[in-house]
Image (cartoon, rainbow, N blue to C red):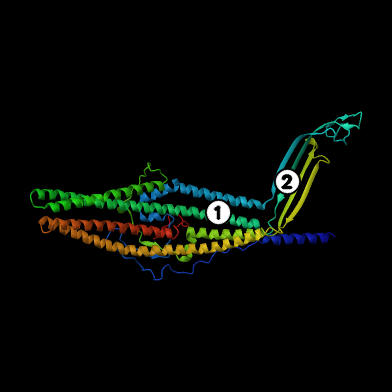
């Protein structure tokens, strides 16, 4: 008999172990990496073109080059480095994303707690009064110390008077829900996926913040250079206008030429206010990114001459890009979450098991609660299965399945967008180099033309209108060169962002 019971218990234990080892729903499998080996249909050039101008060095791409975590240091601007490090500490978006990550991590711990039994204790003292006509009690002092008084009724039977007594109940309760079909494991899996997504979101906030600061710094440098160029043109126009006043007084210049000179000066001066406005707005943006209010200035300022163009650029393979891009990793974790939630929906349609146990004591005085006769216990198991619910659980599981399908397509869409982002940036970098080369050649030609025209004008060989035209062309060529330089810097920074921002790299490791 004992052997039979032992065999029965062993079979039950084995069955429960087998049930506990499996979880309802599909086990998540990471999507396959893209089969693409390149980002462009045509192979990229080994090097971009170069230009005879500042920031005009040729750039090359290397799949072996690593992306440093602090990739912005490659532009070799101490002001930029200091501003980004301070922004990392003060920007409220970083604080919000960090708090969101901590909340998600605590949700994982909370969900894991469902694997363990819940244990509770309670103690309930009470003071009670029974009606005097209840009957059935014997007069006198009871063993619990309660006094029952007896009264006589001349016209009827004897009845007990009102009874006052105390009652105490103390107990320990234990509840346990065995995870037979893996519902809790799927919920923990879902919570972990959400925490991983939040961690990637925090990294994305860091990368985006650094990229926005870099872009704003480059914009400030561009605007300062453009303002300097326009101010120089304004100064030249004022100088020429002063000469023209003398020529007009001497009768050597017509009123029409004088009016043209005044118009040229006014036009040059008119270009300054919009540039100054953009510069102030860019400074406002930099203050906000650094976590400061508009009235709290930051000490860093930026000029093109202080910036360096990285020459060796990293180019991660598409198969590595999906590991590096935070947005792709977030989409992957969302897919993982949807898979786990589908498992929860399936498990919810299966039988639900629970075990409860209670043990304690009760009596009319505390010292009698755990004496003989005062103790109690209960042990109960429960299996529940929904028989009919109007198709609710089935519809919920089918909806969860479609959410999983949707998450799969969204992941693929995110990957394609990430690949396109890198491809667009690569094309932009190649185009920027060509544009800078052309802008540099145009600026040099315009500078040479202006120098020759000024010499000829002083000798009286050309009209003032010719000089104005040369100055205007040089102004436009200078501004175009500045814009081409900044565009090249900006697209280089966008490449580091598009490749994932180097969040996985150790601090201080730079691409060569």
Q: Which mark is residue 168?
A: none
Lateral position of residue 445 relative to residue 150, left or right:
left
For disc 2, the neighbor class at 10 Å (few under 14, some 14 to 19, many from 20) is some
Residue identifier under label 2 = 173
Which residue shows up at 50% across the image and 49% down it? 98
Residue identifier under label 1 = 195
Q: Nearer the viewer, residue 159 or 205?
A: 159
Place of residue 442 in the rendered image (x, y in percent of width and height, measured from the top left) = 24, 62
Rendered-image quadrant of the N terminus: bottom right
Lateral position of residue 19 relative to residue 334, left or right:
right
Dividing the picture into quarters, in which one does residue 149 lie?
top right
For disc 1, the neighbor class at 10 Å (few under 14, some 14 to 19, many from 20) is many
Which residue shows up at 53% across the image and 67% down it? 32
Residue 250 in the image: above or below residue 313: above
The local secondary structure at tag 1 comes to helix
Residue 39 in the image: above or below residue 224: below
Which residue shows up at 9% across the image and 48% down it? 249
Rendered-image quadrant of the C terminus: bottom left
Place of residue 3 in the rendered image (x, y in percent of width and height, measured from the top left) = 82, 61
Whichever of labels 1 and 2 marks the residue nearer the N terminus, that label is 2
The local secondary structure at tag 2 comes to strand
């Amino acid at each position: 008999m004992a052997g039979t019971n032992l065999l029965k218990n062993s079979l039950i234990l084995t069955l429960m172990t087998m049930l506990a080892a499996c979880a309802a729903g599909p086990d998540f499998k990471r999507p396959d990496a893209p089969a693409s080996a390149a980002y462009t249909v045509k192979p990229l050039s080994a090097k971009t073109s170069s230009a005879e101008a500042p920031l005009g060095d040729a750039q090359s791409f290397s799949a072996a080059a690593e992306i440093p975590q602090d990739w912005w240091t490659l532009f070799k601007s101490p002001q930029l480095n200091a501003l980004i490090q301070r922004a990392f500490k003060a920007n409220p978006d970083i604080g919000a994303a960090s708090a969101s990550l901590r909340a998600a991590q605590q949700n994982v711990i909370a969900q894991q707690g469902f694997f363990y039994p819940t244990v509770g204790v309670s103690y309930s003292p009470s003071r009670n009064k029974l009606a005097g006509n209840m009957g059935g009690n014997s007069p006198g002092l009871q063993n619990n110390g309660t006094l029952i008084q007896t009264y006589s009724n001349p016209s009827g039977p004897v009845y007990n008077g009102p009874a006052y007594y105390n009652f105490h109940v103390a107990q320990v309760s234990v509840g346990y829900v065995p995870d037979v079909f893996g519902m809790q494991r799927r919920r923990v899996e879902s919570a972990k996926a959400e925490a991983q997504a939040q961690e990637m979101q925090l990294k994305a906030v860091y990368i985006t913040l650094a990229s926005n600061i870099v872009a704003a710094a480059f914009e400030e440098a561009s605007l300062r250079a453009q303002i300097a160029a326009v101010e120089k043109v304004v100064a030249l126009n004022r100088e020429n206008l002063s000469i023209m006043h003398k020529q007009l007084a001497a009768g050597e210049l017509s009123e029409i030429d004088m009016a043209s000179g005044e118009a040229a000066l006014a036009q040059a001066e008119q270009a300054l206010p919009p540039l100054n406005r953009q510069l102030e707005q860019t400074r406002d943006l930099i203050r906000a990114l650094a976590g400061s209010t508009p009235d709290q200035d930051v000490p860093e300022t930026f000029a093109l001459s202080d910036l360096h163009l990285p020459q060796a650029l990293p180019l991660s393979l598409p198969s590595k890009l999906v590991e590096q891009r935070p947005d792709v990793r977030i989409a992957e974790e969302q897919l993982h979450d949807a898979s786990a939630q589908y498992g929860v929906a399936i498990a919810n349609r299966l039988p639900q098991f629970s075990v409860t146990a209670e043990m304690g004591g009760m009596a009319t005085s505390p010292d009698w609660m755990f004496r003989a006769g005062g103790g109690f216990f209960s042990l109960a198991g429960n299996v529940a299965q929904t028989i009919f619910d109007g198709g609710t659980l089935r519809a919920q599981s089918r909806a969860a399945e479609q959410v999983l399908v949707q998450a799969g397509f969204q992941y693929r869409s995110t990957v394609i967008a990430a690949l396109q982002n890198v491809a667009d940036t690569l094309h932009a970098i190649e185009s920027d180099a060509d544009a800078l080369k052309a802008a540099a050649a145009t600026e040099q030609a315009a500078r040479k033309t202006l120098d020759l025209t000024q010499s000829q004008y002083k000798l009286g060989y050309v009209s003032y209108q010719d000089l104005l035209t040369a100055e205007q062309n040089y102004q436009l060529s200078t501004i175009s060169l500045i814009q081409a330089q900044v565009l090249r810097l900006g697209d280089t920074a966008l490449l580091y962002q598009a490749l994932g921002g180097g969040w996985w790299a150790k601090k201080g490791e730079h691409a060569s």
